[in-house]
Image (cartoon, helix red, strand yellow):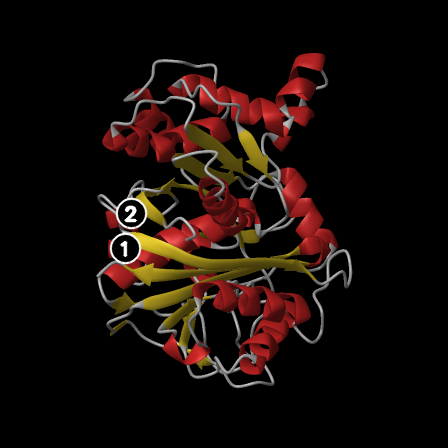
Amino acid sequence: MTKEVFITETNCITPIGFDVATNIQNIESGISGIQLHQNGMLNKPFYASTIDNEELNLAFAKISPSENFTRLEKMMILALQPIVENSKLDLNNKVGFLLSTTKGNITALANPSEESFQSAHLHQLAKNIASFFGFKTEPIVVSNACVSGILAVSVAKRLIQSEMFDNIFVVAGDEVSEFVLSGFNSFQAMSDLPCKPYSKNRTGVSLGEATAAVLVSSSKENAKIKIIGDGAINDANHISGPSRTGEGLYRSIESAFAEAKIKPNQIDYISAHGTATPFNDEMEAIAFNRLGLENVPINSLKGFYGHTLGASGLLETVIGIQSVLESKLFVSLGFDEIGVTQPINIIKENQDKNCNYFLKTASGFGGCNTAVLFEKIK
């Protein structure tokens, strides 16, 4: 019998709150972190969701006097700290640590020195976080474009099922940087308004930054949710454009259903990727229709957080878990009029709904796609 795997602790650090409860409260109130930025990293105004530096430093100072950590490292430590503390686990060789990011400490490369170059390596970021908490096992890094956050959950699940670990702490994070902004700007993908996923009047991506953390465990004690199936398929279509038929996402979800041994008509809610770009939104709508999921309530949380890159999949999982636990589905903020060719059931306002099963999906550059199915603990 395959080992059961659960998520027992969750946390997040975002522009609209430094814990899950505050984030949920602000989402319920329709408060978005996306703001207009007039100066700084681009030579033109842009919309993005960023964490206030003063608030971040004040929060970090409460748990450590150290000045040696980068901005992203502080965000990740703050997300992990209450989870590690609440778990009361002995950090022995059966406890793993998994870090997920796309760009990591990319801002270090602005300083031309050997030390800065070394600190930009993703394994060094993971070692810095691991050292803070005293993890004894070698850190594992998952970096696969914008599926990284949810893929990390899938990897953690499989490592526990292989009996390599009993518990795995997972943290995911990325920050808004000049490198990221210039990259998306070069694609002409940056929106001149807050993003509007799946909408006819969408104009592109809003970027964001956040960290999220979970404890994935083989123990059902204190479990919030059960991970019942996952799939990760690459469509090999294009370096930045998804399959026009949604093939990679379709097969990822299909694989997750096969493992979970449930059917599409049992799904109560989908937390989708929803970047507000024409190719992504259309591809998702096609994939969901191919699987018979067009009537399932669906939202994208990008209207609250922007696209937080490697953090997005885990952040949206954390919010999705809380949404299901509280029997509340949240509005897909920014949506106006359907802007995809296939019907999908966009959540237009907050609603109460008892949910037993929910699906989290993500897609990213290079053709990567990941889907994970969750079941509420009875």
The residue that label 2 is drawn on is 20
Q: Position of residue 132 (x, y in %)?
A: 41, 18
For marks 2 and 1, give the CA distance.
6 Å
Q: Is residue 373 left or right of residue 144?
A: left
Q: Is residue 321 above or below residue 119?
A: below
Q: How many marks?
A: 2
Q: Is residue 42 visible?
A: no
Q: Position of residue 338 (x, y in %)?
A: 51, 82
* Few, some or many residues within 10 Å of mark 1 (<14, 14–19, 20+): some
Q: Residue at x 27, y 22 (%)?
A: 62
Q: Residue at x 35, y 74 (%)?
A: 268
- Disc 2 secondary structure class: helix
Q: Is residue 65 above or below residue 96?
A: above
In the image, 80 versus 347, the foreground residue is: 80
In the image, 328 versus 360, the foreground residue is: 360
- The answer to which quarter of the image holds residue 56 is top left
Q: Amino acid at mark 2?
A: Val
Q: Amino acid at mark 1?
A: Ile
In the image, 190 versus 315, the foreground residue is: 315
The residue that label 1 is drawn on is 24
- The answer to which quarter of the image holds residue 322 is bottom left
Q: Position of residue 310 (x, y in %)?
A: 55, 46
Q: Is residue 215 left or right of residue 28?
A: right
The numbered dot on residue 121 is none
Q: Position of residue 187 (x, y in %)?
A: 73, 57
Q: Seen from this angle, which residue lies furthest front? A: 1
- The answer to which quarter of the image holds residue 210 is top left
C-beta proximity under 8 Å, tags 2 and 1:
yes
In the image, 68 versus 358, the foreground residue is: 358
Q: Is residue 21 above or below residue 234?
A: above
Q: Is residue 192 visible?
A: yes
- Disc 1 secondary structure class: helix
